[in-house]
Image: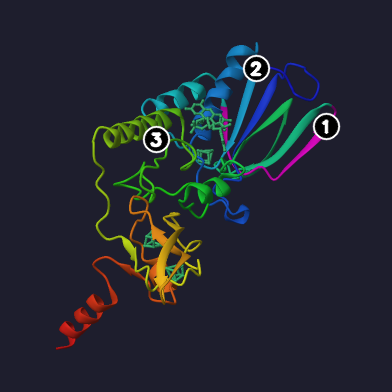
Amino acid sequence: MVRPSDGKVPQSVAFIKCVGSRDDVKGKSYCSRACCMYTAKHAMQVMEKIPDGQAYVFYMDVRTAGKTYEEFYQRSVARGAQYIRGRVSKIYPRGDRLVLKSEDTLLGMPIEVEVDMVVLATAMVPAAGSAEMAKMVGFSTDKDGFFQEAHPKLQPVETFTGGVYLAGACQGPKDIPDTVAQASAAAVKVCGLFSKSELATQPMVSEVDPAKCSGCQFCVPICPYKAISMVSRQEWVHGHKVEREVAQINEGLCQGCGACVGACRSGALNLRGFTDEQIVAEVDALCL
Ligand SMILES: Cc1cc2nc3c(=O)[nH]c(=O)nc-3n(C[C@H](O)[C@H](O)[C@H](O)COP(=O)(O)OP(=O)(O)OC[C@H]3O[C@@H](n4cnc5c(N)ncnc54)[C@H](O)[C@@H]3O)c2cc1C
Ligand code: SF4
Ligand code: SF4
Ligand code: SF4
């Protein structure tokens, strides 16, 4: 264990948790979930690998929700890690050491700690380019930029795009056990998909009336699931064969969201089971 700045072994190390996470000012209100435990692990390593090594941990809360996590945290405290509840307000150099100014909210007084190295537990954020990846595959991201699951409780590995599943930190901050569990679930979902000779699709999908479609392509970028493409169609007009482009729905990809229907100015798109005539008939029936 060495300092990146000069390669010296640090005798004392301060860890600062929740750096960027749980901070609305930084735009990240979420908890990064893994840092409480890996900080406890790193503090333990300072004390075990460096003779007389001392670890200080500045924290807001200690979150140990996981099997044997609380016991591990308690072991790091028993081994000598000094947990200080308080936000560090300033870090400045003194010689080749660093001074941390903070408050100890449990003691209710300001404190100053001098160490050889400071380690920040920074917020887990989506990988660069993940928004482009989501756009390319055709699924959405949540307010923090992580890939959006279809339902947080009932469909945690599915996306709104059929056949696309999520596993790991791309869906949200998580540690290795949760990643492995989610990845195993996603793998089983894929096996389930491939175990059938036929695929069941949504019955409520959009359909195009090619005779009404003007080929304006307005609907193509509107579909969030990339289910609409343009295809060539041959027609007879006044005894002449003409070829023109019309929209086509991929029923395997369409999720029946209906976004395209409202966008089609030619009235060429309809959602099966929710055609204009059916909706008007429903309204009529309600009003009678
Ligand atoms: C500092 C730190 C310490 C941690 N310590 C622990 C710990 O002690 N215990 C624990 O349980 N968890 C720990 N975690 C959490 C753990 O790292 C994650 O839970 C785990 O890595 C998530 O696995 P993953 O496969 O989802 O993502 P990753 O491990 O991040 O793997 C994603 C992979 O996808 C690649 N990739 C990204 N974009 C693309 C692309 N467009 N095309 C191709 N490849 C791409 C990346 O290069 C990467 O290899 C720690 C996290 C951090 C940040
Ligand atoms: S896991 Fe712990 S250190 Fe990380 S953001 Fe949540 S509370 Fe803060
Ligand atoms: S279905 Fe409607 S919006 Fe789409 S290309 Fe045809 S006319 Fe344009
Ligand atoms: S209803 Fe239209 S916009 Fe929605 S998924 Fe189907 S084709 Fe795409």
**Is residue 88 shown in magenta?**
yes
Q: Position of residue 154 (x, y in %)?
A: 29, 47
Which range is magenta? 82-95
Q: Which residue is mark 3?
A: 65
Q: Which comes before the other along the chain, label 2 or label 1?
A: 2
Q: Which comes before the other along the chain, label 1 or label 3?
A: 3
Q: Is residue 55 left or right of residue 285?
A: right
Judged from the image, the secondary structure of the residue bearing numbered disc 1 is strand
Q: Position of residue 244 (x, y in %)?
A: 48, 65
Kindly give the residue lying farthest to the right in the view shown: 95
Q: What amino acid is at disc 3?
A: Ala
Q: What amino acid is at disc 1?
A: Arg
Q: Which residue is mark 2?
A: 53
Q: Which residue is mark 1?
A: 94
Q: Nearer the viewer, residue 135 or 111?
A: 135
Task: Indicate yes or no: mark 3 CB to ligand 2 under 8 Å.
Answer: no
Mark 1 or mark 3, whichever is nearer to me:
3
**Is residue 3 shown in magenta?**
no
Q: Position of residue 231 (x, y in %)?
A: 45, 58
Q: Residue at x 83, y 26 (%)?
A: 96
Coloration mode: rainbow
Q: What amino acid is at disc 2?
A: Gly
Q: Nearer the viewer, residue 33 or 204?
A: 204
Q: Quadrant of the N terminus?
A: top right
Separation (CA) of disc 2 from disc 1: 19 Å
Kindly give the residue lying farthest to the bottom in the view shown: 288
